[in-house]
């Protein structure tokens, strides 16, 4: 088992409307800083991008009725990193939750850096949606 932390942001939108606005992979670069500088390209069910540390391959969960936006990132070493991402109902609004798994070999400093990155991206998502 990998240690994990879940980060979230509350957004004043119906969760279903929010999910429909952001579930498509081509929307991710508008708020996910690791993809913002990249030309996201699709080939079959895989997407390719230039990540902060080189070329990456991403598989996204297909559109669904449950607000699941999981994605699986291969950074080139052949190991996929699962990134659970959910949009759920929070009263009249939505909660967007992303779980960060501490990967093998990731020290405290790297884990903290990734946590800050996720927090920044979730704030960027909220700003993107609420303008």
Image (cartoon, grey):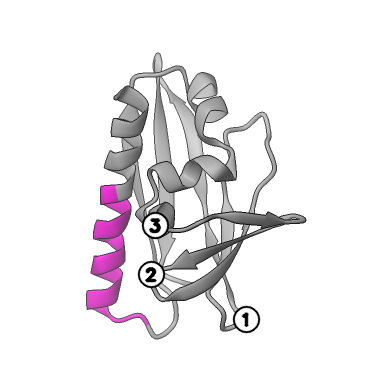
- Pinpoint residue 51: horizontal percent, then vertical percent: 44, 67
Instruction: Specify which label sits upstream in the sequence, 1 or 3.
Output: 3
Query: Where the C terminus falls, by quadrant?
Result: top left
The label nearer to you, 3 versus 2, is 3
Instruction: Specify which label sits upstream in the sequence, 3 or 2.
Output: 3
Mark 3 — residue?
Answer: 37
- Pinpoint residue 55: horizontal percent, then vertical percent: 52, 73
Please tell me which residue lies in front, 25 or 43: 43
Q: Say if 115 sits above or below 111 in the image.
A: above
Residue 53 on the magenta span: no
Mark 2 — residue?
Answer: 52
- Which residues lie in the magenta part? 106-120
| Mark 2 neighbour density, 10 Å: few (under 14) some (14–19) many (20 or more) | few
Mark 1 — residue?
Answer: 78
- Pinpoint residue 103: horizontal percent, then vertical percent: 44, 75
Q: Are marks 3 and 2 in contact (CB under 8 Å)?
A: no
């Amino acid at each position: 088992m990998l240690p994990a932390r879940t980060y979230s942001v509350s957004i004043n939108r119906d969760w279903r409307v929010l999910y429909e606005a952001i579930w498509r992979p081509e929307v991710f670069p508008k708020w996910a800083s690791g993809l913002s500088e990249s030309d996201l390209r699709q080939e079959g069910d895989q997407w390719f991008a230039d990540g902060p540390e080189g070329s990456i391959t991403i598989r996204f969960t297909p559109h669904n009725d449950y607000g699941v936006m999981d994605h699986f990132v291969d950074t080139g070493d052949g190991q996929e990193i699962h990134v659970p991402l959910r949009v759920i109902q929070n009263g009249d609004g939505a909660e967007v939750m992303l779980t960060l798994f501490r990967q093998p070999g990731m020290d405290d400093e790297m884990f903290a850096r990734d946590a800050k990155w996720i927090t920044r991206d979730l704030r960027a998502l909220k700003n993107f949606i609420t303008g």
